[in-house]
Amino acid sequence: MTEGIPVEILLAGFVIVVILVIVHEIRSIQTYDKGVNLAIQKKIEQIEKKEKENRWVPASEVKEEDLAEENAGLVADDEEEESEALFS
Amino acid sequence: MRQMSEPAKVNPILPEVMLNGILKTGLVVVGGKNTGKSNAGKVISSEIIRNQPLPIQLKIFDTASNLRWDFEPILFQSIDERTRYFYDGDEHILFDIALVDEIDILSFVERVILTDYYRMRARKELLGGHINKWILYLIEEAQNEIGSYSLMRREGMRLLKFFSEGRNFNQSYILIGQRLADVSTRAIERCSGYLFGKMTGDNDIAKLKRIVGRDSVIVNDVKKLEVEKGQFLYYNGASTYDFNCPKYDSKGQKPKPYILDLKNIPTWRYREGVRII
Protein backbone atom coordinates (compact mmCIF):
# COMPACT_ATOMS: atom_id res chain seq x y z
CA MET A 1 0.00 0.00 0.00
CA THR A 2 2.94 2.29 0.77
CA GLU A 3 4.64 1.19 -2.33
CA GLY A 4 5.93 4.15 -4.25
CA ILE A 5 5.77 6.63 -1.30
CA PRO A 6 9.24 7.57 -0.15
CA VAL A 7 10.14 6.78 3.45
CA GLU A 8 11.16 10.43 4.04
CA ILE A 9 7.66 11.64 3.26
CA LEU A 10 6.12 9.05 5.55
CA LEU A 11 8.50 10.05 8.32
CA ALA A 12 7.80 13.74 7.76
CA GLY A 13 4.07 13.02 7.91
CA PHE A 14 4.52 11.10 11.12
CA VAL A 15 6.55 13.92 12.65
CA ILE A 16 3.88 16.49 11.62
CA VAL A 17 1.15 14.39 13.21
CA VAL A 18 3.19 14.04 16.41
CA ILE A 19 3.81 17.82 16.50
CA LEU A 20 0.10 18.53 15.95
CA VAL A 21 -0.85 16.16 18.75
CA ILE A 22 1.66 17.84 21.11
CA VAL A 23 0.44 21.35 20.19
CA HIS A 24 -3.16 20.28 20.74
CA GLU A 25 -2.29 18.83 24.14
CA ILE A 26 -0.42 21.96 25.20
CA ARG A 27 -3.32 24.16 24.11
CA SER A 28 -5.86 22.06 25.93
CA ILE A 29 -3.71 22.20 29.08
CA GLN A 30 -3.52 25.99 28.72
CA THR A 31 -7.29 26.25 28.22
CA TYR A 32 -7.82 24.07 31.26
CA ASP A 33 -5.47 26.26 33.32
CA LYS A 34 -7.27 29.36 32.13
CA GLY A 35 -10.60 27.80 33.08
CA VAL A 36 -9.29 26.85 36.51
CA ASN A 37 -7.90 30.36 37.02
CA LEU A 38 -11.21 31.90 36.03
CA ALA A 39 -13.10 29.60 38.38
CA ILE A 40 -10.72 30.48 41.23
CA GLN A 41 -11.05 34.20 40.49
CA LYS A 42 -14.83 33.91 40.46
CA LYS A 43 -14.77 32.08 43.77
CA ILE A 44 -12.52 34.77 45.30
CA GLU A 45 -14.87 37.49 44.05
CA GLN A 46 -17.84 35.67 45.56
CA ILE A 47 -16.06 35.35 48.91
CA GLU A 48 -15.03 39.03 48.84
CA LYS A 49 -18.59 40.05 48.02
CA LYS A 50 -19.94 37.91 50.83
CA GLU A 51 -17.39 39.40 53.23
CA LYS A 52 -18.36 42.90 52.17
CA GLU A 53 -22.04 42.11 52.66
CA ASN A 54 -21.34 40.75 56.11
CA ARG A 55 -18.98 43.56 57.01
CA TRP A 56 -21.61 45.51 58.91
CA VAL A 57 -23.32 43.70 61.73
CA PRO A 58 -26.26 44.99 63.81
CA ALA A 59 -25.17 45.68 67.39
CA SER A 60 -27.85 43.32 68.68
CA GLU A 61 -25.87 40.47 67.16
CA VAL A 62 -22.60 41.46 68.83
CA LYS A 63 -20.46 38.77 70.37
CA GLU A 64 -19.24 39.39 73.89
CA GLU A 65 -15.62 38.76 73.00
CA ASP A 66 -15.76 41.54 70.39
CA LEU A 67 -17.22 44.11 72.79
CA ALA A 68 -14.06 45.15 74.61
CA GLU A 69 -12.11 45.58 71.38
CA GLU A 70 -14.86 47.63 69.70
CA ASN A 71 -15.37 49.96 72.66
CA ALA A 72 -11.63 50.46 73.15
CA GLY A 73 -11.55 51.81 69.59
CA LEU A 74 -14.62 53.98 70.15
CA VAL A 75 -13.30 55.58 73.34
CA ALA A 76 -9.89 56.23 71.77
CA ASP A 77 -11.59 57.87 68.77
CA ASP A 78 -13.71 60.15 70.94
CA GLU A 79 -10.78 61.30 73.03
CA GLU A 80 -8.78 61.99 69.89
CA GLU A 81 -11.59 63.95 68.27
CA GLU A 82 -12.42 65.93 71.40
CA SER A 83 -8.79 66.95 71.81
CA GLU A 84 -8.72 67.92 68.13
CA ALA A 85 -11.84 70.03 68.64
CA LEU A 86 -10.28 71.72 71.66
CA PHE A 87 -7.18 72.79 69.77
CA SER A 88 -8.80 73.70 66.48
CA MET B 1 -46.35 78.16 55.88
CA ARG B 2 -49.27 78.94 53.57
CA GLN B 3 -50.71 77.32 50.52
CA MET B 4 -50.04 79.39 47.41
CA SER B 5 -52.92 81.72 46.59
CA GLU B 6 -54.29 81.43 50.13
CA PRO B 7 -53.95 83.97 52.93
CA ALA B 8 -51.01 83.39 55.26
CA LYS B 9 -51.81 81.53 58.47
CA VAL B 10 -49.88 81.05 61.68
CA ASN B 11 -48.67 77.47 61.72
CA PRO B 12 -46.18 75.42 63.69
CA ILE B 13 -42.70 75.06 62.22
CA LEU B 14 -43.43 71.63 60.85
CA PRO B 15 -47.08 71.63 59.73
CA GLU B 16 -49.08 68.43 59.70
CA VAL B 17 -49.41 68.44 55.92
CA MET B 18 -45.66 68.38 55.57
CA LEU B 19 -45.03 65.77 58.24
CA ASN B 20 -47.70 63.49 56.76
CA GLY B 21 -46.21 64.09 53.32
CA ILE B 22 -42.75 63.13 54.55
CA LEU B 23 -44.03 59.89 56.06
CA LYS B 24 -46.24 58.97 53.13
CA THR B 25 -44.15 59.95 50.15
CA GLY B 26 -40.68 60.86 51.42
CA LEU B 27 -38.99 64.23 50.94
CA VAL B 28 -36.21 65.51 48.72
CA VAL B 29 -34.59 68.74 49.92
CA VAL B 30 -32.69 70.40 47.13
CA GLY B 31 -31.20 73.82 46.45
CA GLY B 32 -28.00 75.56 45.43
CA LYS B 33 -25.01 76.08 47.69
CA ASN B 34 -25.63 77.96 50.96
CA THR B 35 -29.40 77.95 50.59
CA GLY B 36 -29.90 76.43 54.03
CA LYS B 37 -30.67 72.83 53.05
CA SER B 38 -28.78 71.32 55.96
CA ASN B 39 -30.38 73.87 58.28
CA ALA B 40 -33.81 72.84 56.94
CA GLY B 41 -32.92 69.19 57.55
CA LYS B 42 -31.89 70.02 61.11
CA VAL B 43 -35.03 72.04 61.78
CA ILE B 44 -37.36 69.33 60.44
CA SER B 45 -35.61 66.52 62.31
CA SER B 46 -35.28 68.50 65.55
CA GLU B 47 -39.02 69.28 65.41
CA ILE B 48 -39.67 65.53 65.15
CA ILE B 49 -37.28 64.81 68.03
CA ARG B 50 -38.48 67.60 70.33
CA ASN B 51 -42.21 67.38 69.76
CA GLN B 52 -42.53 63.65 69.01
CA PRO B 53 -45.79 64.12 67.07
CA LEU B 54 -45.84 60.41 66.22
CA PRO B 55 -43.73 57.46 67.33
CA ILE B 56 -41.02 58.21 64.78
CA GLN B 57 -37.45 56.99 65.07
CA LEU B 58 -34.91 59.07 63.20
CA LYS B 59 -31.84 57.52 61.64
CA ILE B 60 -29.50 60.13 60.21
CA PHE B 61 -26.68 59.39 57.78
CA ASP B 62 -24.20 62.24 57.61
CA THR B 63 -21.02 62.07 55.56
CA ALA B 64 -20.18 65.76 56.05
CA SER B 65 -20.05 65.84 59.87
CA ASN B 66 -22.66 68.60 59.79
CA LEU B 67 -24.70 67.42 62.74
CA ARG B 68 -22.28 65.79 65.10
CA TRP B 69 -21.09 68.96 66.79
CA ASP B 70 -24.28 70.97 66.76
CA PHE B 71 -27.52 69.06 67.04
CA GLU B 72 -30.00 67.53 69.47
CA PRO B 73 -28.59 65.32 72.27
CA ILE B 74 -29.36 62.07 70.48
CA LEU B 75 -26.98 59.12 70.14
CA PHE B 76 -24.31 59.25 67.49
CA GLN B 77 -21.98 56.58 66.18
CA SER B 78 -18.85 57.16 64.11
CA ILE B 79 -18.65 54.82 61.17
CA ASP B 80 -15.19 54.29 59.75
CA GLU B 81 -13.03 51.53 58.28
CA ARG B 82 -12.71 49.81 61.66
CA THR B 83 -16.39 49.83 62.59
CA ARG B 84 -18.11 46.46 62.48
CA TYR B 85 -21.23 46.79 64.65
CA PHE B 86 -23.83 49.48 64.06
CA TYR B 87 -26.53 50.69 66.43
CA ASP B 88 -29.88 49.03 65.79
CA GLY B 89 -31.85 49.87 68.94
CA ASP B 90 -34.99 52.00 69.30
CA GLU B 91 -33.57 55.47 69.98
CA HIS B 92 -32.81 58.19 67.45
CA ILE B 93 -29.34 57.71 66.01
CA LEU B 94 -26.90 59.79 64.01
CA PHE B 95 -24.39 57.85 61.93
CA ASP B 96 -21.41 60.09 61.37
CA ILE B 97 -19.89 58.39 58.32
CA ALA B 98 -16.16 58.83 57.82
CA LEU B 99 -15.91 56.38 54.92
CA VAL B 100 -14.52 57.60 51.61
CA ASP B 101 -15.31 54.80 49.20
CA GLU B 102 -18.74 55.32 47.65
CA ILE B 103 -19.47 51.59 47.55
CA ASP B 104 -18.56 51.24 51.25
CA ILE B 105 -20.94 54.07 52.13
CA LEU B 106 -23.68 52.59 49.98
CA SER B 107 -23.22 49.12 51.48
CA PHE B 108 -23.42 50.56 54.99
CA VAL B 109 -26.59 52.54 54.28
CA GLU B 110 -28.05 49.50 52.55
CA ARG B 111 -27.25 47.22 55.49
CA VAL B 112 -28.87 49.55 58.04
CA ILE B 113 -32.00 50.17 55.99
CA LEU B 114 -32.52 46.58 54.90
CA THR B 115 -32.01 45.27 58.44
CA ASP B 116 -34.88 47.56 59.48
CA TYR B 117 -36.88 46.54 56.43
CA TYR B 118 -36.88 42.86 57.36
CA ARG B 119 -37.64 43.66 60.99
CA MET B 120 -40.51 45.98 60.13
CA ARG B 121 -41.84 43.30 57.81
CA ALA B 122 -41.70 40.78 60.65
CA ARG B 123 -43.28 43.32 62.99
CA LYS B 124 -46.14 43.90 60.53
CA GLU B 125 -46.79 40.18 60.33
CA LEU B 126 -46.75 39.79 64.10
CA LEU B 127 -48.98 42.80 64.71
CA GLY B 128 -51.57 41.78 62.14
CA GLY B 129 -50.76 44.36 59.50
CA HIS B 130 -50.40 47.39 61.79
CA ILE B 131 -47.00 48.76 62.68
CA ASN B 132 -46.91 51.06 65.70
CA LYS B 133 -43.84 53.10 64.77
CA TRP B 134 -42.14 54.87 61.86
CA ILE B 135 -38.50 54.90 60.92
CA LEU B 136 -37.44 58.05 59.11
CA TYR B 137 -34.03 58.15 57.43
CA LEU B 138 -32.41 61.51 56.88
CA ILE B 139 -29.64 61.24 54.32
CA GLU B 140 -27.37 64.30 54.27
CA GLU B 141 -25.37 64.98 51.10
CA ALA B 142 -27.41 62.26 49.39
CA GLN B 143 -25.19 62.36 46.31
CA ASN B 144 -22.50 60.66 48.43
CA GLU B 145 -24.72 57.83 49.60
CA ILE B 146 -27.03 57.32 46.66
CA GLY B 147 -25.40 59.03 43.70
CA SER B 148 -26.77 59.08 40.14
CA TYR B 149 -25.94 55.49 39.19
CA SER B 150 -25.68 53.88 42.62
CA LEU B 151 -29.04 52.11 42.51
CA MET B 152 -28.20 50.56 39.14
CA ARG B 153 -25.17 48.85 40.66
CA ARG B 154 -25.45 45.41 42.10
CA GLU B 155 -24.71 46.81 45.56
CA GLY B 156 -27.59 49.26 45.33
CA MET B 157 -30.21 47.07 43.69
CA ARG B 158 -31.58 45.84 46.99
CA LEU B 159 -31.85 49.38 48.30
CA LEU B 160 -34.28 50.05 45.47
CA LYS B 161 -36.66 47.66 47.24
CA PHE B 162 -36.69 50.05 50.18
CA PHE B 163 -37.36 53.10 48.02
CA SER B 164 -40.24 51.35 46.28
CA GLU B 165 -41.76 49.34 49.15
CA GLY B 166 -40.45 50.92 52.36
CA ARG B 167 -43.56 53.00 52.95
CA ASN B 168 -45.65 49.83 53.28
CA PHE B 169 -43.48 49.00 56.28
CA ASN B 170 -43.53 52.51 57.81
CA GLN B 171 -40.08 53.43 56.52
CA SER B 172 -39.64 56.81 54.89
CA TYR B 173 -36.79 59.11 53.98
CA ILE B 174 -35.54 62.67 53.62
CA LEU B 175 -32.82 63.12 51.02
CA ILE B 176 -30.76 66.31 51.11
CA GLY B 177 -28.66 67.21 48.09
CA GLN B 178 -27.33 70.14 46.10
CA ARG B 179 -28.48 69.07 42.67
CA LEU B 180 -31.33 66.84 41.58
CA ALA B 181 -29.10 65.43 38.84
CA ASP B 182 -26.51 64.17 41.34
CA VAL B 183 -28.90 61.96 43.28
CA SER B 184 -30.23 58.68 41.90
CA THR B 185 -33.29 59.32 39.72
CA ARG B 186 -34.67 55.97 40.87
CA ALA B 187 -34.87 57.33 44.41
CA ILE B 188 -36.03 60.83 43.49
CA GLU B 189 -38.81 59.66 41.18
CA ARG B 190 -40.24 57.36 43.82
CA CYS B 191 -40.70 60.35 46.09
CA SER B 192 -43.51 62.88 45.67
CA GLY B 193 -42.52 65.46 48.26
CA TYR B 194 -39.96 68.15 47.47
CA LEU B 195 -38.58 71.06 49.39
CA PHE B 196 -36.99 73.43 46.90
CA GLY B 197 -34.44 76.01 47.94
CA LYS B 198 -33.22 78.72 45.57
CA MET B 199 -32.05 77.23 42.28
CA THR B 200 -30.70 79.05 39.26
CA GLY B 201 -28.58 76.57 37.25
CA ASP B 202 -29.98 75.54 33.83
CA ASN B 203 -29.56 71.86 34.55
CA ASP B 204 -31.39 72.14 37.89
CA ILE B 205 -34.23 74.13 36.34
CA ALA B 206 -34.58 71.57 33.54
CA LYS B 207 -34.88 68.78 36.11
CA LEU B 208 -37.31 70.87 38.14
CA LYS B 209 -39.51 71.35 35.07
CA ARG B 210 -39.62 67.60 34.61
CA ILE B 211 -40.89 67.20 38.18
CA VAL B 212 -43.41 70.05 38.49
CA GLY B 213 -44.34 70.53 34.84
CA ARG B 214 -42.95 72.90 32.26
CA ASP B 215 -45.54 75.67 32.84
CA SER B 216 -45.74 75.50 36.61
CA VAL B 217 -45.32 78.78 38.51
CA ILE B 218 -42.89 77.00 40.81
CA VAL B 219 -40.20 77.21 38.12
CA ASN B 220 -40.13 81.00 38.37
CA ASP B 221 -40.84 81.16 42.10
CA VAL B 222 -37.84 78.99 42.89
CA LYS B 223 -35.49 81.49 41.25
CA LYS B 224 -36.85 84.32 43.39
CA LEU B 225 -36.61 82.66 46.81
CA GLU B 226 -34.74 84.68 49.41
CA VAL B 227 -31.96 82.66 50.95
CA GLU B 228 -31.43 85.07 53.89
CA LYS B 229 -35.02 84.57 55.02
CA GLY B 230 -34.73 80.78 54.81
CA GLN B 231 -37.40 80.59 52.13
CA PHE B 232 -38.27 77.23 50.59
CA LEU B 233 -41.15 75.87 48.54
CA TYR B 234 -42.75 72.61 49.58
CA TYR B 235 -44.40 70.71 46.71
CA ASN B 236 -46.26 67.47 47.41
CA GLY B 237 -47.23 66.54 43.88
CA ALA B 238 -50.55 68.40 44.05
CA SER B 239 -50.12 71.64 46.00
CA THR B 240 -47.34 74.06 46.76
CA TYR B 241 -46.67 75.67 50.13
CA ASP B 242 -44.28 78.34 51.36
CA PHE B 243 -41.91 77.08 53.99
CA ASN B 244 -39.99 79.71 55.91
CA CYS B 245 -37.32 77.85 57.75
CA PRO B 246 -36.01 79.45 60.96
CA LYS B 247 -32.34 79.19 61.85
CA TYR B 248 -31.67 76.02 63.78
CA ASP B 249 -30.61 76.45 67.39
CA SER B 250 -29.24 73.45 69.23
CA LYS B 251 -29.21 75.46 72.49
CA GLY B 252 -25.62 74.44 73.07
CA GLN B 253 -26.34 70.73 72.96
CA LYS B 254 -24.66 68.05 70.90
CA PRO B 255 -25.15 64.35 70.23
CA LYS B 256 -23.70 61.88 72.72
CA PRO B 257 -21.55 58.95 71.65
CA TYR B 258 -23.03 55.48 71.48
CA ILE B 259 -21.04 52.87 73.35
CA LEU B 260 -21.61 49.30 72.31
CA ASP B 261 -22.90 47.50 75.38
CA LEU B 262 -24.91 44.34 75.83
CA LYS B 263 -27.19 46.15 78.29
CA ASN B 264 -28.10 48.73 75.68
CA ILE B 265 -29.35 46.30 73.11
CA PRO B 266 -32.09 44.11 74.50
CA THR B 267 -34.71 44.82 71.83
CA TRP B 268 -33.63 42.70 68.93
CA ARG B 269 -31.69 40.03 70.75
CA TYR B 270 -32.43 36.40 70.40
CA ARG B 271 -33.60 35.01 73.70
CA GLU B 272 -33.61 31.26 74.01
CA GLY B 273 -33.92 30.93 70.28
CA VAL B 274 -36.87 33.32 69.96
CA ARG B 275 -36.34 36.68 68.31
CA ILE B 276 -37.82 39.52 70.33
CA ILE B 277 -39.47 42.03 68.01
Image: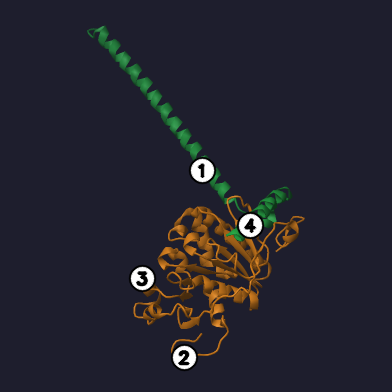
Task: Report x, y in % for residue B139.
Answer: 53, 65
Q: CA distance from mark 1 to mark 2?
A: 59 Å
Q: How is the image coloured?
A: by chain
Q: Pointer 2 indicates a residue of which chain?
A: B
Task: Report x, y in % for residue B133.
Answer: 65, 72
Chain orange in the figure, letter: B
Image vertical order of residue B266 relative to residue B16, above or below = above
Dots 3, 1 in contact, CB < 8 A: no
Of badges 4 and 1, the one in the foreground is 4
Of badges 1 and 2, the one in the foreground is 2
Task: Name the residue carrying label 3.
Answer: B201
Q: Pointer 3 indicates a residue of which chain?
A: B
Dots 3, 2 in contact, CB < 8 A: no
Q: Dot 2: what SS?
A: loop
Residue placed at 43% from the left, 26% from the top?
Answer: A29
Q: Pointer 1 indicates a residue of which chain?
A: A
In the image, are marks 1 and 2 on the same chain? no
Q: Dot 1: what SS?
A: helix
Task: Name the residue carrying label 4.
Answer: A83
Residue placed at 54% from the left, 47% from the top?
Answer: A49
Left or right, B64 with reference to B82: left
Dots 3, 4 in contact, CB < 8 A: no
Q: Residues within 10 Å of mark 4 (few under 14, many from 20)?
A: few
First along the sequence among labels 4 and 1: 1
Q: Amino acid at mark 3?
A: Gly
Q: Amino acid at mark 1?
A: Glu
Report the number of numbered marks: 4
Q: CA distance from mark 3 to mark 1?
A: 42 Å
Task: Name the residue carrying label 2.
Answer: B6
Task: Report x, y in % for residue A20.
Answer: 34, 21
Q: Is residue B247 visible?
A: yes
